[in-house]
Structures are given as structure tokens and as C-alpha cells.
Image (spheres, helix red, strand yellow):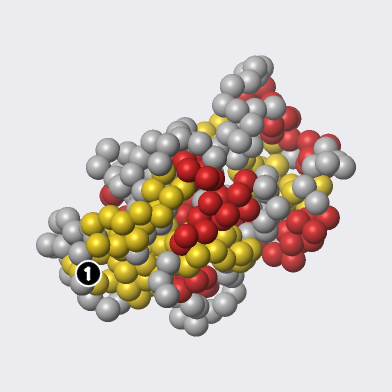
Amino acid sequence: MTQEMRAVEITSPGGPEVLQLVTRPVPEPGHGEVVIKVAYAGVNRPDALQRAGLYNPPPGASDLPGLEASGTIVALGTGVSEWAVGDQVCALLPGGGYAEYVATPAAHCLPVPEGMGLKEAACLPETFFTVWSNVFNRGGLKGGERFLVHGGSSGIGTTAIQLAHHFGARVFATAGSEEKCQACRDLGAEVAINYRDADFVEVLQAEGGADLILDMVGGPYIPRNLKALADDGRLVQIAFLQGPKVEVNFVQLMTRRLTMTGSTLRPQSDLAKARIAQDLAEAVWPLLSAGRIGPVMDSEFSLDEAAKAHARMESSGHIGKIVLRVAG
């Protein structure tokens, strides 16, 4: 294996232009880790937040962006027995995905689903780990419940719609254009709400309220989300694209028995992420292998076009996932 690799680093906090192609040493696997020769890396909102200086890597993680990738295992650390050199996997990463090689805990790897290419597989870990842990584990979504996901055409949204629909929920989604709303309906949303034309609060209240809302917008959406919830409803917050601070009347939490919770994936322990991976292997990976659900692909850029990929994501014009082609 070569000793050096191409990688994209954040030269200083700023816009997409601060992403620069550099040469770095190939990482060595630590105890319980594998090294993956990266074929494709997923591009996600947290990468852009890190690039802007708003989301620092956890202690010990690579300073390179990239939280998910697919490829081939080329090295095993001590204590790794569940994988072999040559296995094709996709993996949740602590960082470092924008590179030709990356190290990650072996327990955070999952096999490439049957019949799926490496490009599509690179789109799975970040969104599926996030949706499963927040919608089903933390949010407790059950069949028959009314589920609202904001940003329905995003990577998170397209994943949440498919999984919630598959497990029997009534799915509502918001998006910013008719094209995006139609994409949500095609994936299983019963109702797609163009937030530029309609008020999601009114739509959900007319249906009896949402039992669960998954939100990444924050800011002014927080009090509106509470109004849109049914009694005993749950709000799960996973990001704050419009800010984390807002004034809320908490009396309604008591009188209507509402629950507000949330999480971020990256700072969680290796064990917590390994447990999510095991859940996905048992409950979701068979659905992917059977073609019953799958990632929605938007666009592909080469590794040296990482800045263009970030500009595409921040334009909010995309539907589904953006990937970087690393190998070849």
C-alpha cells in the first residue's frame, strides 16, 4: 500500500473555495479499526459546517472533512475479526472521508448491499444512521402514526420518507418547489407541502397533528413545530439551519404532554454508533438488498471538485445525495 494519498483539507474557515487538494500520509489502523481505500465519499451538511468553522471534529478524529464513504478494506487493526482485507464496505466515519484512504472503527462498517454499486453505497451511512437513531430509536415512530419531516428532498429527508413509509407511518414532508414535493410523493409521502405556498402547521392540524416531527431547520420552525404536533407528540431536532435560539411558551409541553428531544451523531461514542450499525444490519440492510428502498442520487463530483460539490449542496437545488468520486 502506498505511503501517501490525495486528500481535501480545509485550509481555513470559509466558503467552498477553502477546500484544497493536498497530499497526506495514509492513515494506519488503530485497535479495532480498518483502513478503507475510498471509492466514493458522501457530501453532507456537517461537512459544510466544519468547513465554515462551526463544527469541530471530536478529539482524536481526522481534521479532514467526510463522514461517510464506500470502498475496499486494505488493512486491519488489532482485534478486528469480522472483516477481511478485500471486503467491500460502506462506513460511518469520524472524519477523513475526503481522501483516498480513511481509518474508521470496524464496527461502524456495513457490507455494500446486494445489487448496489459503491457510488450508491457511499450515500447510506450518514443519513441512515441519523434517521434510524432519531426517528425510530429516539422518536419511537410506529406504524399508523403521522410523521412530518422537514427538508423532505434532502438526503436525510429522502431516507426518512422511505423508511417511515415502509414501516407503516403516514408521511408528510415539506420542500421548497413542486419538483421537490413530487420527489417526496414518489418516495412515499402522503402529503408534500411546498412551504413557500402553504403553512405546514395548518395542514397538520387539519389531519389531527403530527405524532412525530423530524426537524433540521430550527429557529422560527420550533414554535410552529410545537403547534403542529398532536397531543403527546414528539419533536426531534437534528440541526439548526435557521439558528438554535428562539422564544417558546413551554406551558404547552405540560398541557399537551409534548416531548422535545434531539441528537447529533458525530460526538456519540463508538459503542453507540456500533449499536446503530447493528440495528441497521438487521432491520434495514435487507430492504436495501431487496431494492425496496434506496438512496436518491443528485450528482457526482471528482475529489478535486469538492468545492463545487459544496456549492451545489449549499445552493439547496439538489434532490437527494451528492458524492465525491475518489478512486479512478
Q: How many marks?
A: 1
- If the image is split into quadrants, where does the C terminus sit? bottom left
**Percent position (x, y) of residue 157?**
63, 53
Which residue appears at 34% of the width and 64% of the height?
100
Determine the residue located farthest toward the right in the rendered image. 197
Residue 318 in percent (x, y) is at: 67, 56
Q: Which residue is mark 1?
A: 2
Which residue is depicted at the point 27% across and 38% down? Answer: 59
The quadrant where residue 80 appears: bottom left
Question: How far across and how far down the image is residue 327, in percent?
Answer: 40, 71
Looking at the image, can residue 174 be seen? Answer: yes
Q: Is residue 52 above or below residue 140?
A: above
Secondary structure of the residue carrying tag 1 is loop
Note whether 143 is above or below 281 in the view shown.
Answer: above
Quadrant where the N terminus sits is bottom left
Dividing the picture into quadrants, the one containing residue 214 is top right
Q: Compared with residue 82, is residue 14 higher up or lower down, i.e. above or below?
A: above
Q: Residues within 10 Å of mark 1 (few under 14, many from 20)?
A: few
Q: Is residue 127 visible?
A: no
- Amino acid carrying label 1: it is Thr
The residue sitting at the left extreme is 78
Task: Answer left or right for 238 relative to 189.
Answer: left
Residue at x 29% of width, y 45% of height: 61
